[in-house]
Amino acid sequence: MRTYRQCKSFSLIELLSVIGIIAIVATIILGGMNYAGKRADEAKTISLMTQLEMALDAFKQDRGYYPPMASAVTVEFLTVSNKLTLQLGGASGQYEFVHSSTQRPYLELGWVTNTAQPYIDAWGNAFQYSCPGTNNTASYDLWSEGASSSADDDICNWKRRQ
């Protein structure tokens, strides 16, 4: 006859302890993945913003000015086109974003398929452009609204340049 001490199995406490440890480890891993995903989205947005800044600076070096805005009151979006047009206030206010001597775009994005859409950040929000800028009065303001529409997570060219 078998006694209780001869039975080779796990007790309920041992099983619950193992399940608890697995739950804690899974929570830590999922939290780390969420944090890494947020940082990857920020890095992607900063990378695209840096490319847009370089294109805007090349435009200024070539033409002597940054693309102006059609209205000082509204903030216009940077818009993609086949030759990378910076749409500022409708069809009459478009500036061809093409180098004057080489006739090549200042910025080429091979993955862009819908050329009527604005440049978007990692969260699907359009980049905002203002020239002359409120914060960069000698040049332009370029920013992304970040993951939410609140100002505390905005990615801005004036915050990164300080």
Image: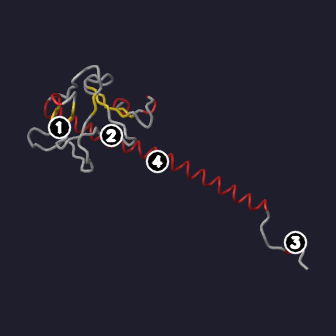
Within the image, what quadrant is residue 67 found in? top left
Q: Is residue 19 left or right of residue 104?
A: right
14, 92: nearer the viewer: 92
Could you tell me how far apart the alpha carbons at marks 4 and 1 are, in whole angstroms?
32 Å
Q: Which mark is residue 37?
A: 4
Could you tell me how far apart the alpha carbons at marks 1 and 2 are, in whole angstroms?
17 Å
The structure residue drawn at horizontal position 31% and vertical position 22%, both measured from the top left corner, is 134
Q: Nearer the viewer, mark 1 or mark 2?
A: 2
Q: Position of residue 74 (x, y in %)?
A: 29, 23
Could you tell me how far apart the alpha carbons at marks 4 and 3 are, in whole angstroms?
50 Å
Disc 2 target residue: 120
Amino acid under label 1?
Phe
Within the image, what quadrant is residue 42 found in? top left
Q: Secondary structure at mark 4?
A: helix
Disc 1 target residue: 97
Within the image, what quadrant is residue 6 found in? bottom right
Q: Earlier in the sequence, mark 2 or mark 4?
A: 4
The structure residue drawn at horizontal position 36% and vertical position 32%, both measured from the top left corner, is 156
Q: Secondary structure at mark 3?
A: helix
Q: Earlier in the sequence, mark 4 or mark 3?
A: 3
Disc 3 + disc 1, Cβ < 8 Å = no
In the rendered view, would you say 45 is above or below 7?
Answer: above
Amino acid under label 2?
Ile
Q: Position of residue 25 (x, y in %)?
A: 62, 54
Amino acid under label 3?
Arg
Could you tell me how far apart the alpha carbons at marks 2 and 4 are, in whole angstroms?
17 Å
8, 88: nearer the viewer: 88
Could you tell me how far apart the alpha carbons at marks 3 and 2 are, in whole angstroms?
66 Å
Q: Is residue 90 left or right of residue 122?
A: left
Crowd class of label 2 (few under 14; some 14 to 19; many from 20; radius 10 Å) = some
Q: Position of residue 104 (x, y in %)?
A: 13, 44
Q: Which mark is residue 5?
A: 3
